[in-house]
Amino acid sequence: MKTWFITGASRGFGALIAKEALAAGDAVVATARNAQSVIDALGEHPRLLAVDLDVTDEAQAHATASAAIKRFGRIDVLLNNAGFGLLGAVEEATAAEIEALYRTNVFGLLGVTRAILPHMRRQRSGHILNISSVGGYQSGAGFGVYCSTKFAVEGLSEALHAELAPLGIKVTVIEPGYFRTDFLDARSLTTSPTRIADYDATAGTVREHAAAVSHNQPGDPAKLAPAVVALVASENPPLRMPYGSDTVAAIEAKNAFVAGELAQWRDAAVATDFAV
């Protein structure tokens, strides 16, 4: 039996993965700002501990980690799932909107991870799953600030992967594409009220597309949850795990673009070295 620690577990991917882990016979510490919302979503269960956690409060994260250890003795899987989106051009976003996004998506993830790592290091085992996005690999108009938080998650995950591998702790960054969850709803996606006409053809178009695609996304959340539980059971999980054909296509397109651009500018790039 593994013990999972899941943030943002009251709905979306967090709730679905929590249910799947419980069904697999694991224990789950499921957190949300309001623990009752977790119980409402998951029900009562002898292997479930629902706990209040605001991920932006690092002291509360340490207290929650201690409560998890007291109840189950160990933490085997950390799923950093809590987060939200911001839609709008980079210039349209306000300082307050940007700060709030980073406080949850980046600093919150860091705080929870730092709270859990001492326990995993003591065990010399564990698996950290950081929810990123297709936007953590390829950014785009209208989601630039949001994607920048996920780029940060990817960079942190790469470093953690290198730092923790010698200690027996695995790290995987999960990159879902568009899945049919409530991510594009107002509860999960903040839309900047500022509109600048010069961006109507770029970020403005993305605003309209997001509204149209909401609840019509190609990805099936019911398939992602068991896929993540199976990933944790694998002996050699990947550093990056994309989910969804749209994510795979985006990764392939970006890799091809980067390779082509590098080939075109390679001579200029290497010419800046000292002459040998």
Image: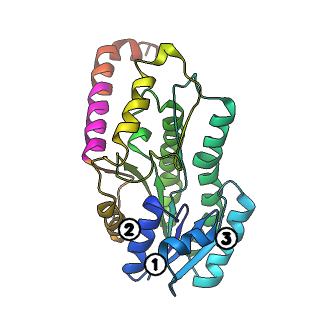
Looking at the image, residue 168 lies above or below residue 217: below
Looking at the image, residue 16 lies above or below residue 208: below
What is the distance, in whole Å, between disc 3 and disc 2 at their CAs?
22 Å
Relative horizontal placement of residue 47, taking residue 255 as reference (left or right)? right
Residue 145 position by quadrant: top right
Mark 1: amino acid: Lys
- Residue drawn at 30 percent across, 32 percent down: 255
Q: Determine whether the residue tagged by mark 2 lies in a helix, strand or loop.
A: helix
Q: Which residue is mark 2?
A: 232
Closest to the camera, between mark 3 and mark 1, is 3
Residue 211 position by quadrant: top left
Residue found farthest to the right = 59
Closest to the camera, between mark 3 and mark 2, is 3
Provide residue 74's location: percent of width, then percent of height: 57, 78
- Per the rendering, the mark at residue 242 is none
Q: Which residue is mark 3?
A: 64
Name the residue nearer the viewer: 274 or 231: 231
Tell me which label, 3 or 2, sits earlier in the chain.
3
Name the residue nearer the viewer: 207 or 126: 207
Q: Which residue is mark 1?
A: 2
Please give the range of residues in magenta. 245-257
Residue 12 position by quadrant: bottom left
Q: Determine whether the residue tagged by mark 3 lies in a helix, strand or loop.
A: helix
Circles 1 and 2, Cβ within 8 Å, touching? The answer is yes
**What type of secondary structure mainly makes up the magenta span?**
helix
Residue found farthest to the bottom = 46
- Residue drawn at 30 percent across, 36 percent down: 250
Tell me which label, 1 or 2, sits earlier in the chain.
1
Provide residue 227's location: percent of width, then percent of height: 31, 64
Q: How is the image coloured?
A: rainbow
Q: Determine whether the residue tagged by mark 1 lies in a helix, strand or loop.
A: loop
Residue 250 on the magenta span? yes
